[in-house]
Image: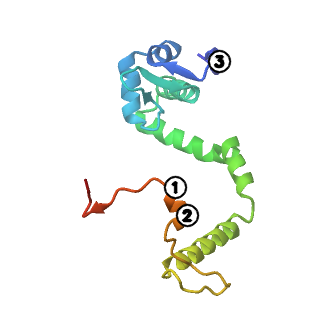
């Protein structure tokens, strides 16, 4: 069965994958154990669900096992080789590389420095003046005028509410 024979859907149930690949369900489950990254998603109380890429991978595993006569270890090694050689051609990885850009490291370091500065500011005690002219202050709550119209908060004593 070729890739063209896979229905144009994004998700498949286990019986559909078995039918497409012409294998028994116990074979598919054993391959799931051998290849943990075979993206089976078991829904809560529902059937096993596979993505289209998983179906293509099942077909590739079957072709390597039965067609080329490889062992499971040989199939794993072959799939690893194929994924490492095709990793640069993966459009998802290309999109990530494009988003990060060439100056990604500098931008990440800039964000890291900013976060450290914020951490240092927050570590200082309230009321301590900062270099840039800012000052941390303690918010004592709403003003008296606002407090008259606000709903009174329940007082607590050692974590218990007063009655």
**How are the residues colored?**
rainbow
Quadrant assignment, res 11: top right
Q: Which residue is mark 1?
A: 149
- Determine whether 124 is above or below 112 in the image: below
Q: Label 3, secondary structure: give it.
A: loop
Q: Residue at x 67, y 72 (%)?
A: 110
Q: Earlier in the sequence, mark 1 or mark 3?
A: 3
Q: Label 2, secondary structure: give it.
A: helix
The answer to whether marks 2 and 1 mark residues whose Cβ atoms lie closer than 8 Å is yes
Q: CA distance from mark 1 to mark 3?
A: 62 Å
CA neighbours of label 2 inside 10 A, class few (<14), some (14 to 19), many (20+): few
- Determine whether 98 is above or below 1 in the image: below
Q: Is residue 163 left or right of residue 16?
A: left
Q: Is residue 33 left or right of residue 51?
A: left
Q: Residue at x 65, y 18 (%)?
A: 8
Q: CA distance from mark 3 to mark 2?
A: 66 Å
Q: Label 1, secondary structure: give it.
A: helix
Q: CA distance from mark 2 to mark 1?
A: 7 Å
- Observer-nearest residue: 105 or 93? 105
The nearer-to-camera label among 3 and 2 is 2
- Determine whether 85 is above or below 8 in the image: below
Which label sits on residue 145? 2
- Determine whether 11 is above or below 79 in the image: above
Which label sits on residue 8? 3
Give residue 98's position: percent from left, percent from top.
Answer: 74, 52
């Amino acid at each position: 069965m070729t890739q063209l024979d896979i229905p144009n859907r994004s998700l498949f149930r286990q019986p559909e994958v078995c039918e497409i690949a012409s294998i028994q369900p116990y074979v598919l489950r054993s391959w799931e154990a051998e290849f943990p990254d075979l993206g089976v998603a078991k829904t809560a109380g529902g059937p096993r669900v596979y993505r289209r890429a998983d179906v293509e991978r099942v077909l590739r595993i079957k072709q390597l096992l039965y067609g080329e006569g490889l062992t499971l270890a040989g199939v794993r090694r072959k799939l690893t080789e194929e994924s490492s050689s095709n990793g640069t051609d993966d459009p998802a990885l290309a999109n990530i590389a494009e988003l990060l850009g060439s100056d990604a490291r500098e931008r990440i370091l800039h964000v890291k420095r900013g976060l450290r500065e914020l951490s240092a500011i927050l570590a200082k005690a309230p009321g301590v003046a900062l270099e840039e002219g800012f000052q941390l202050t303690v918010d004592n709550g709403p003003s008296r005028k606002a407090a008259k119209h606000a709903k009174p908060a329940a007082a607590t004593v050692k974590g218990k509410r007063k009655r």
